[in-house]
Amino acid sequence: MNWDDETDPGTSAERLVGAAADGEDQAVEAALRPKDLSEFVGQEKVRQQLDLVLKAARQRGATADHVLLSGAPGLGKTTLSMIIAAEMNAPIRITSGPAIQHAGDLAAILSSLQEGEILFLDEIHRMSRPAEEMLYMAMEDFRVDVIVGKGPGATAIPLELPPFTLVGATTRAGLLPPPLRDRFGFTAHMEFYDPGELQRVIHRSAGLLDVEIDTDGAAEIAGRSRGTPRIANRLLRRVRDYAQVRADGRITREIAAAALGVYEVDARGLDRLDRAVLEALLKLFGGGPVGLSTLAVAVGEERETVEEVAEPFLVREGLLARTPRGRVATPAAWTHLGLTPPQAAAPGNGQQGLFGA
Ligand SMILES: Nc1ncnc2c1ncn2[C@@H]1O[C@H](COP(=O)(O)OP(=O)(O)OP(=O)(O)O)[C@@H](O)[C@H]1O
Ligand SMILES: [Mg+2]
């Protein structure tokens, strides 16, 4: 299952550096998931805040407030929802927005919850409108109205629910209607991880996978993991294959760099597509500005692929900027590809780019 199919026009799931989970990820992720807050690497703020929320609820012997987890794919939302259940010593029910087609589907789930149970609603921004409205009441008053019958004879039968904790996850917090957002007692915004944190994720996973890796090897993989633990774990598995087949199984910086070279993931985590986009922008269009459609034709990809698969990371890395006049390469893009920016042209001819020369 592809958890983020709307930001993902098809290619990203098969990319080694795509953030959405692929089949292999799903198979191994359960084994690599931290089981409690102390094992969860990074996200210091979120961890501290969540620790307080959960401890306080435990001390009061109450159900924890509803929690919204927002952040890009692969940063640990599902993991954190399971940790919440573990910390509260409560069972967890897992479902997702797209799985709830009708309000009745949600009513069935809600009415079967036990007291204190965690309801994990993944991709909560993709729930249907009627289900969403039912959820408002359930979250606030622990009550749902079950509609029996049709037309003028339909009646609403109120149904009391046991107190439960809703944990919603979304990659698009901005898409949540404010009434839904407001009903969460606590919102955790997950940030991308810094290389040091990813290094810890990699060491931890290597331990669980029984792979020998040194500090430099972990640092090399971390630097190419695009701030995302899921990608770090995936790259680690590919490097492990290489180390096993081409060397003695131990992962060092050289082994990691050589392995990821084979997979065309460069030192900054750019893959073939990312580099093709940058290269076209620099070599064919002098660094821009150039329109998205033209750029897409130049790399032989769909507009959407360039815009939604390649560009977000290039923008985040400060290699490319989207401007009203078109796409523009930053000086860092020239440096990254080992190219020299063209000399500053005479002022006023528009070829200098927005960043000067
Ligand atoms: N803080 C962390 N420490 C260690 N491992 C982590 C951490 N966050 C995530 N991971 C690892 O990354 C993988 C992906 O995490 P997870 O499935 O929780 O992401 P997600 O945010 O739910 O992604 P999606 O938006 O695609 O559902 C998991 O296998 C987990 O082991
Ligand atoms: Mg998830």
Image (tube, grey):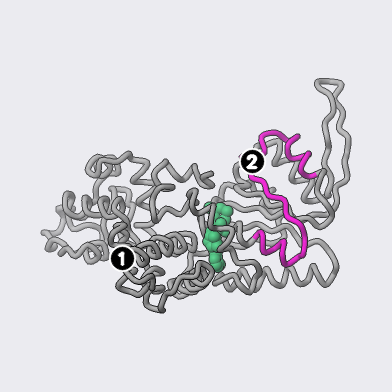
Q: In this view, does 218 lie to the left or right of 29?
A: left
Which SS class for mark 2?
A: loop
Front residue of 93/246: it is 246
The residue depicted at 81 percent of the width and 45 percent of the height is 112
Labels 2, 1: front one: 1
Residue that numbered label 2 is attached to:
127
Of the four image quadrants, the one with ligand 1 is bottom right
Q: Let me know if residue 186 appears in the view.
A: yes
**For residue 131, above or below residue 279:** above
Front residue of 305/238: it is 238
Q: Let me know if residue 190 appears in the view.
A: no
Front residue of 86/52: it is 86
Residue that numbered label 1 is attached to:
246
- What's the mark number on residue 342? none
- Residue 85 lies within the magenta run: yes
Disc nearer the start of the sequence (2/1): 2
Q: Which amino acid does label 1 sit on?
A: Arg
Q: Alpha-carbon neighbours of circle 2 within 10 Å: few (<14), some, or many (≥20)?
A: many
Q: Which image quarter holds the C terminus? A: bottom left
The residue depicted at 60 percent of the width and 67 percent of the height is 34
Q: Give the range drawn in magenta.
A: 81-110
Give the percent coordinates (x, y) of residue 321.
Answer: 32, 56
